Amino acid sequence: MKVDGEHYRTIWIAADDPATVLAIDQHKLPHEFEIMRLCAVDDFVAAIKDMRVRGAGLIGAAAGYGMYIAALTAPQDRAQFMFVAAEKLLATRPTAVNLAWAVKRQLRATEKCVARDDAVRAALRTAEAIADEDAESCRRIGLHGKELIIKAAEKKRGGTVNILTHCNAGWLAFVDHGSALSPVYAAFDEGIKTHVWVDETRPRNQGAALTCWELGRHGVPHTLVADNAGGHLMQHGMVDLVLVGADRVARNGDAANKIGTYLKALAAKDNGVPFYVALPSSSFDLEMDSGLANVPIEERDASEVCFVSGKGSEGKVTTVQICPDGTQARNWGFDVTPARLIDGLICERGICAASEKEINNMLKDVV
Ligand code: MRU
């Protein structure tokens, strides 16, 4: 997508140095746009853990590039070095299945290579393929999901379609285009009148910081709301469609996404508002039978709940404590929305029901 007229992906290999991967540093947004350099496996581990790169698709792509850098920087015992790199990357964040999917794909791609150069070439090819497929899948999600927005616009006789989204499932969460926001961009670019309600998404405020930044850059009208406002908006007919992303969807259609998504799905069901989850096929976990029972939910440091960062009155980014000293806090990053609350899954292959039968049918030839 474009930043100040220039096309960017969220992660790519430096044009002048194949041993350096560049990525947008999402800690700095929305106040600064900075590119960071990732040159060693530990740089990738830290960037994923600290959420300088984040979002299911981007975490997967970063893990793919991290494994390429592992192959490139490996000493004599390459297999052992890559195994350790894989373990380190896998330990960073547990919920988004794209991470494990990308690491395993890299291990498969390189395991039979004997010569170092062959392993590096295979890892590079695979890392680029993971990134390219992610971008293309998201582009196609936009084309399928756009139809839902067009239908909603027809129902409103050309009136503005109000879409509510949670967290950031835009291009910053992937390599390009995004999942939940890709249909919004596609519809907007086609001249459909759209407006997005953006949940702030406590505690890390990905909605306020990242989704508002993205939508603003693209010129899509949007309004930031407090996390708890969605139910009220739906009760008053102010939401036509809820579009969210997913970090992992199990075989039964249960969808893990940013904490708070489940509450939006409940409110949508109660108010008859269509609730759709958008994801590339790399975010399905077909080995998992029930999302609710089995998705590992990341619990992050409680300090993320107790402190918030933002631009102070002097224009400098600052962090403040929002609760009494010593307050006990817990910080679950994700929740699972049961399949029964989801009207459909938007994938690069089309839209299907959140049911085992339809998911299997849609993904039958995916390996
Ligand atoms: O914790 P994050 O910011 O990495 O969260 C992941 C997400 O971006 C969201 O849950 C998103 O809605 C799905 S992944 C694109």
Image (cartoon, grey):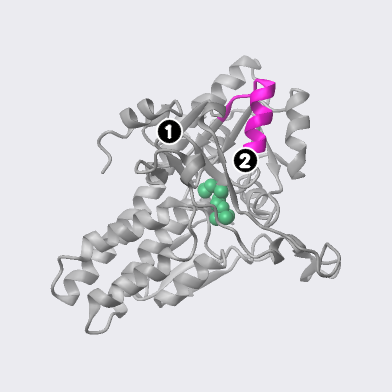
Q: Which mark is residue 4?
A: none
Return the disc, 1 or 2, that comes first in the chain's sequence.
Answer: 1
Q: Can residue 7 be seen from the camera position used here?
A: yes
Residue drawn at the location 57% of the way across and 28% of the way down = 341
The correct choice, above or below, for 329 with respect to 136 in the image is: below
Q: Position of residue 315 (x, y in %)?
A: 80, 68
Write down the region rendered in magenta: 261-275
User: Label 1 neighbourhood size at 10 Å, few (<14), some (14-19), many (20+)?
Assistant: many
Q: Is mark 2 within 8 Å of ligand 1?
A: yes
Residue drawn at the location 54% of the way across and 52% of the way down = 297
| Type of amino acid at the residue the image marks with label 2 | Thr
In magenta segment, residue 227: no
The correct choice, above or below, for 255 with respect to 65 in the image is: above
In magenta segment, residue 272: yes
Query: What residue is disc 2 on?
Result: 261
Q: Is residue 224 left or right of residue 93?
A: right
Q: Which quadrant would residue 118 be assigned to in this image?
A: bottom left
Closest to the camera, between mark 1 and mark 2, is 1
Secondary structure beneath label 2: helix
Query: What residue is disc 1 on?
Result: 252
Q: Which quadrant would residue 195 be assigned to in this image?
A: top right
Q: Is residue 68 left or right of residue 50?
A: left
Secondary structure beneath label 1: loop
Q: Is mark 1 within 8 Å of ligand 1?
A: no
| Type of amino acid at the residue the image marks with label 1 | Asn
User: Label 2 neighbourhood size at 10 Å, few (<14), some (14-19), many (20+)?
Assistant: many
The correct choice, above or below, for 353 with respect to 13 in the image is: above
Residue drawn at the location 33% of the way across and 68% of the way down = 67
Majority secondary structure in the magenta region: helix
Whether the residues at callouts 1 and 2 have beta carbons within 8 Å, the answer is no
Q: Position of residue 85 (x, y in %)?
A: 36, 72
Residue drawn at the location 58% of the way across and 35% of the way down = 243
